[in-house]
Amino acid sequence: MPSAPTKTITLHDVARAAGVSLITASRALGNPSVVSPATIARVQAAVEATGYIPNLLAGSLKSRRSRMVAAIVPALAVAQFLPSLQTLTAGLAAGDYQLLLGETGYDPAREEAVIDTMLSRQPEGIVFTGLVGAERSRERLRRAGLPVVETWDFTTRPVDMLVGFSQQQVGSAVAGYFLSRGWQRVGVATADDQRAMQRHAGFEAAIGRRVPTAKVPAPSNLALGRRAMTDLLAQDPGLRAVACSSDQLAQGVLVEAQARGLRVPEDIAICGFGNADFSEHLLPSLSTVVVDGPGIGRRAADMVLARCRGETVASPVVDVGFRIVERQSTGTAAA
Amino acid sequence: MPSAPTKTITLHDVARAAGVSLITASRALGNPSVVSPATIARVQAAVEATGYIPNLLAGSLKSRRSRMVAAIVPALAVAQFLPSLQTLTAGLAAGDYQLLLGETGYDPAREEAVIDTMLSRQPEGIVFTGLVGAERSRERLRRAGLPVVETWDFTTRPVDMLVGFSQQQVGSAVAGYFLSRGWQRVGVATADDQRAMQRHAGFEAAIGRRVPTAKVPAPSNLALGRRAMTDLLAQDPGLRAVACSSDQLAQGVLVEAQARGLRVPEDIAICGFGNADFSEHLLPSLSTVVVDGPGIGRRAADMVLARCRGETVASPVVDVGFRIVERQSTGTAAA
DNA sequence: CTGTTAGCGCCTTCAT
DNA sequence: ATGAAGGCGCTAACAG
């Protein structure tokens, strides 16, 4: 149990201790360039002496600047988005902004509620992982008039700003890559979230037909990958290549293949998505789709901060693209 | 670009639209049990009509309840803590509290700054991953008089509340397990963060001497594990067992061993830490130290929420313990 | 059940 | 460079 809360120390107390007026103390802390150095020193000494902790809530109320940015993610534990979140957090912290975190749990219904909850905290900007689903929410956000960045997806009509890439294009690119290798008996292991399903749609569109598909609940992981592979082989025992909606899933597919004595890539090729930190170092190393996750977070932070400073963002819609890296799991030379 | 921000709609506007007083509108929204159903309906209709978004900042200022809890983590991308963070976020959201996220980047110097930043946002509680390092910070937090939960570690003198386990005990338990198997030529692959180093200290203490050790920068991952294994084998080519500070690191050690044609566990045994979602499904499956990560987050949320409600927490210091699960990577029967 | 009054702690505006 | 007043939007505390 902590010591009994001492009476709150406010800026008023600091000002008195420093022998200046309230507002001078406020300026010494928040806008020191207009205060004499001597005064600043006395105020800072008073802050030390009193153990003053500013109340940003109160300041924000008047200044209308909360110095918070909300980030809304489907789920925290999705490895996929961590690098983005990491750079976003870091970028915001560098600009002296804090991160308010919200989770939708992949549930579109909860999205609306989360948005409202977040908005009521007066963040100066909102960053979404993915697009905002409900048109109602999109309109509400536009009305709120604060910078909004949608990420990890693409549309020509974002709520406000966007930094991402086309999921469909990823799907068809992977399909094109498989076809270029002459693989006809291909399958897909995919999570059931919206973006993964779009990639799947792009994949089948490019292949030109339905392909054996194992669908698992998001967020995917290695265990689900093993199950998906079992499922796929039941659908087509002669499968030659599998496209996966995440590297975690792909690793599961790989492990299950190896557990069954299949050689990768000689017997079956595997491609992941996301270029997780482990993918390059597996045996065999995992071919995958590389997306600049850290870059997405960094740009999102930059965009929001720029708008918070009142600047106009030159390119409010950025397609960061993606590329397929060919490693051993789809290569000609096996591990 | 969003539409020009319309004049802020306040509760005042809602009250006028509903034909009631400001405070009645406030109560209809925040404490409906004392307002007549008819009035509530009219206020809610007015909220809909006006598109009102409450300003929680203003409310918090007066009520001294921010409905925010701060979580301070070393880094977001540490897979280890994700399950805890996940349940913490969920638990708080269920109690209608939001998560404010802060990162220290494993830097004790930044910890203090982060704490101050967080405190200035008036969170109603703070949850730490690990113990608070600096005595100065500990004292400051005690003074602040808000519920504090330290997690993932153990001490008899927590700042306030604690839910975790002894790192030293983990280290010596793993060492004891290795010894019980008769393995003498053992080594350690460890990250350089404080908790991992404590486990290492516990390990060596139980072994009774220094052991070959490969240290990598936190947060650890598969790639660092491969490097660590290379390092360890250089130190002792006849190594029989390796204890790792994370399952990610252990997987790297495993992959590197396999890449060198070593059989696991016949030639060399490997034990991880954390029981990541993939560990059970690797080939060979990974023996590891199981910690109830989700439980830690859940309990932390419960403790903070209870104290926010003014309740006293019966057991403010909880040792959740740990256990070693023996799988194939240290088992007698190989994969 | 509803309303009036008085701030929460700070920052903006206007003065000096 | 410093100060005095006023109010941000909301809710406790007391009335009716």
Image (cartoon, coloured by chain):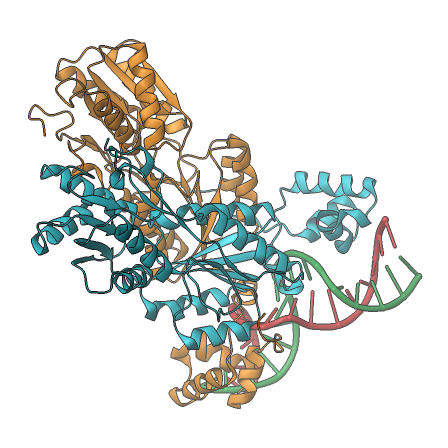
Chain colours: A orange, B cyan, C red, D green
Quadrant where the N terminus of chain A lies?
A: bottom right
- Percent position (x, y) of residue B311? 67, 60
User: Is residue B148 found left or right of B326 in the rendered image?
Assistant: right
Q: Could you say which is closer to the camera, residue B254 or residue A25? A: B254
User: Image point 55% across, 78% down: which residue?
Assistant: A11
User: Image point 34% across, 55% down: which residue?
Assistant: B173
User: Image point 32% across, 58% down: which residue?
Assistant: B171
- Percent position (x, y) of residue B114? 41, 66
The quadrant where residue B205 appears: bottom left
Up the image or down, A89 lies above or below A21; here it is above
The quadrant where residue A189 appears: top left
Up the image or down, C13 lies above or below A172; here it is below
Up the image or down, A235 lies above or below A270; here it is above
- The answer, for residue B222, to whether it is visible in the render is no
Up the image or down, D4 lies above or below B326; here it is below
User: Image point 38% across, 87% down: which residue?
Assistant: A37
- Percent position (x, y) of residue A17? 54, 89
- Percent position (x, y) of residue B270? 23, 45
Quadrant where the C terminus of chain A lies?
A: top left
Label tally? 0
- The answer, for residue B315, to whether it is visible in the render is yes
The quadrant where residue B172 appears: bottom left
